[in-house]
Amino acid sequence: MGQQPKVYVTRSIPEAGLGVVREACQARVWQEKLPPPRQVILEEVSDCDGLLCLLSDEVDATVMDAGELRVISQYAVGVDNIDLEAATARGIPVGHTPGVLTEATADLTFTLLMAAARRIPEGIEKVQSGAWQTWEPMGLLGAQVWGATLGVIGLGRIGTAVARRGRGFQMRVLYHDTEHKWKLEEELGLIYASLEELLGEADFVSVHTPLLPETQQLIDEGALRRMKPQAILVNAARGEIVDTQALVRALEEGWIAGAALDVTDPEPISADHPLVRLENCIVVPHIGSATVRARERMAEMAAQNLLAGLRGERLPYCANPQVYQVIDG
Ligand code: DGY
């Protein structure tokens, strides 16, 4: 039997995937709670054939050139931390984990939406602090979700799953995307809207685009000012899609009623940041895909991608399929 390929795994992931990697490779695994420092990644990849990384690792051309990686496998669906162009130019396929975290992330998005609408964190705080003294006729009044208008920005897998949930609550669901999704419109009863229309009409605006140069700070001051004063912004996609400073002002000055965020810019966000301190903002620590089932499937897929790349086979879930034009010449 030939020598096993060498791989570096930047954090301990569920055994469903890690076990498979360990069996087939000489795997070195970063065991700490926080991500490995950049210098460690640069040193570790220098003799590796494969890298299994997380969204908290910056994987750019310098990392790629620090060794002779044959595959990069990301334990996430989003790959904005990886320079895909640089990987493609070097003939390195990049794997990711689409599909298996869709419903978990949509569940979390809807949880955030409802928690913000019904002011759940304020209610919990009231009980825990002993401030709850009686049933209050005017206390903690929130927004009704049932029958309200939901605006979904980005009708990909997760956006669609959120739209389905909205329809389950009899919501009028507007969506904006780079193109009409006629089949889904018909199947789910969705309404296409320009970004401006969606922002102006929705009671709940939910962001589901990938982070790309064109979606960076898509929700800027202008977008926030276009929203209704009673509207709530939900972001479970990437923090950089929303202009943080503008959002703080929008929440402080009442341009919008509230926000609920699974992702932030910066991430992690400090405990004394205004977004964390504001009563009309909920922040949770990027847990969209954090169910046992989703994370196990993500680990399995990340392992499948890694091993396929090491064997020189096409990755089953490839984020830069153009790489095969480079590889196949
Ligand atoms: C992803 O996969 O991109 C999520 O943000 C984390 O699971």
Image (cartoon, rainbow, N blue to C red):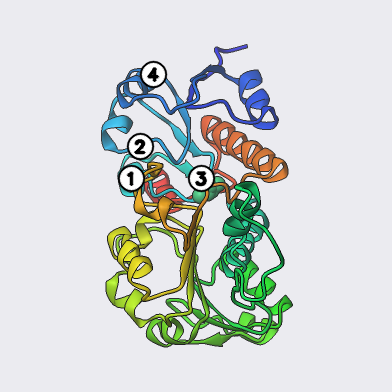
Quarter occupied by the N terminus: top right
Q: Is residue 138 left or right of residue 274?
A: right
Whether disc 4's CB lies below 8 Å from ligand 1 is answered: no
- SS at badge 2: loop
Q: Is residue 141 above or below residue 9?
A: below
The span from disc 3 to disc 1 (Cα, nearest Å) is 24 Å
Whether disc 3's CB lies below 8 Å from ligand 1 is answered: no
The mark found on residue 59 in the picture is: 2
Residue at numbered disc 1: 83
**Residue 197 occupies which quadrant of the picture?**
bottom left
Residue at the location (62% across, 44% down)? 290
Q: Earlier in the sequence, mark 4 or mark 2?
A: 4
Inspect the image, locate mark 4, and give the three-letter code of the amino acid beneath it: Glu
The span from disc 1 to disc 4 (Cα, nearest Å) is 19 Å
Q: Residue furthest front?
A: 133
Inspect the image, locate mark 1, and give the three-letter code of the amino acid beneath it: Asp
- Mark 2–mark 1 contact, CB under 8 Å? yes
